[in-house]
Amino acid sequence: MSPTASTLTAARSRGIPEATVARLPIYHRVLSALMDQGVQTVSSDELARNCGVSPAKLRKDLSHLGSYGTRGVGYDVEFLSYHISRELGLTSPWGVVIVGLGNLGHALAAYRGFASRGFNVVAVLDTHPDVVGTVVEVGGKQLRVQSIADAGAVVQRTRAAIGVIATPAEVAQDVCDRLVAAGIRSVLNFAPAVLDTPAEVEVRKVDLAVELQILAFHEQRRGEEPLPEAMNA
Amino acid sequence: MSPTASTLTAARSRGIPEATVARLPIYHRVLSALMDQGVQTVSSDELARNCGVSPAKLRKDLSHLGSYGTRGVGYDVEFLSYHISRELGLTSPWGVVIVGLGNLGHALAAYRGFASRGFNVVAVLDTHPDVVGTVVEVGGKQLRVQSIADAGAVVQRTRAAIGVIATPAEVAQDVCDRLVAAGIRSVLNFAPAVLDTPAEVEVRKVDLAVELQILAFHEQRRGEEPLPEAMNA
DNA sequence: TAGATTGTTAATCGATTAACAATC
DNA sequence: TAGATTGTTAATCGATTAACAATC
């Protein structure tokens, strides 16, 4: 079939598969690295190899954004990078609030990857009276730790869009409720707890224990290999 | 069809879907919490609600492990918990090596979730001469930071199975190569780099920037106008 | 043009879901 | 038994893959 207006519209319009969205940041990062190296053009084979995916998957993913390559040539690195960042919403910076300043919270606050990727840590919050009022250095700026009780005012003033929960599991749900009440609709949860939120809130979870246990599962399976003919037929 | 020997064997045998494996740790954690609360029996509806999944998905997942529930009653919390931990390979502890003792590495070393979930940090490594030889407190023990150059001996002596990479991106591939050469087959990668490894090595990646960018995508879609008029402050 | 490489198709594979028969 | 709840089925949905026509 020839590409009609309607098929083009379908490709360019709203429904980008979640699996594709989850890979776009990797493509974007690798393209940035290629730009730093002065590479101007890259083929789907080469880019895919750098990203650790198959060329077919890469081309399929990119086809959901539009048609930004040139047949017989490849992709212009800068052009493609721009269109991915546009699709991801990275063309203007997002404000991030970090809640919980234990070891992990401090590590996150010190992380340089925020600013370089279009995210600004605009506030740090904690529940504990001992921690509130102390000063943390975040991306060159000094930020005073504020109380989670002030989440509403803080989010309104800073226009923060994303909340990062780095608290113990016990207080994570309460913290999340306060962030949501304050207007936060995007949450990154590092606490080992399942958060209950309204449907319009997008929660993503990073869980060290879960990752380790998945590795343990495969590690165990690998060890069980040494009995090929015994057991089941 | 009636459940024949072959269908039972199929269900119990090797192929547990990856998507199911990825959820087992959550089920396990919630079951542990229920045990702590003294709950003895739980239905799939109740357990699913606590885990943030649908009851149908939960029952489907559990059916891959075997038949550990009782129709009309539900699941015995302790019994099910045991079988999940057995399936995940958590009945004996796994040794973990942490590489890279920057902010994140220190936070990981201080994390209490390791020991309580069947993982022991048995060694900490770094590349930098200034850091090697310093002492880090990990789970009550004092561990001396060793050189990545000694990875082979360290892995052999400690019988570590899992390597955690918490280094900058630039050295991540080199560190990974050394861990693999040392016999590590399971890697948890916190560095923002795509690692190239032999097929038998299982790599999982935790990536703050990727998670944030996925949130940004949905945030943008939700508003369709990131910062209405005022731009960033 | 001839060679190279994209964007799309169609087949396959795996995961999710709702419904319900089995059974406690 | 009657009510409750599992384990399984079958339909649906979404993601992956290989192949190739389009086209630079």
Image (cartoon, coloured by chain):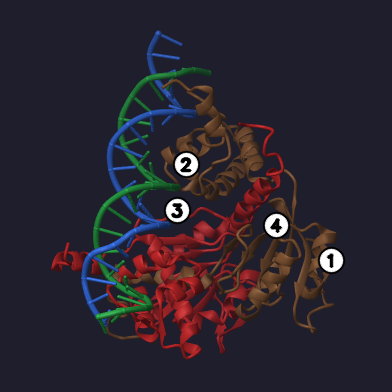
Chain colours: A red, B brown, C green, D blue
In this orientation, which residue lies closer to the viewer: B183 or B49? B183
**Badge 4 amino acid:** Phe
Question: Of callouts 2 and 4, which one flags the residue occurring earlier in the amino acid sequence?
Answer: 2
Q: Residue B73, percent across and down?
A: 51, 25
From the viewer's perspective, is residue B169 above or below residue B118? below
Q: Which mark is drawn over residue B114?
A: 4
In this orientation, which residue lies closer to the viewer: C11 or B103? C11
Taking B100 as reference, is B208 left or right?
left
Q: Residue B68, percent across and down?
A: 57, 30
Disc 1 marks which residue? B153
Q: Which mark is drawn over residue B100?
A: none
Q: Residue D24, percent across and down?
A: 26, 82
Task: Give the Cα distance between marks 1 and 4.
Answer: 23 Å
Q: Chain of mark 4?
A: B
Which quadrant holds the N terminus of chain A? Answer: bottom left
Nearest-to-viewer mark from 2 and 1? 1
Asked if marks 2 and 4 fall on the same chain, the answer is yes
Q: Which mark is drawn over residue B48?
A: 2
Q: Chain of mark 3?
A: A
**Badge 2 amino acid:** Ala
Taking B72 as reference, is B199 left or right?
right
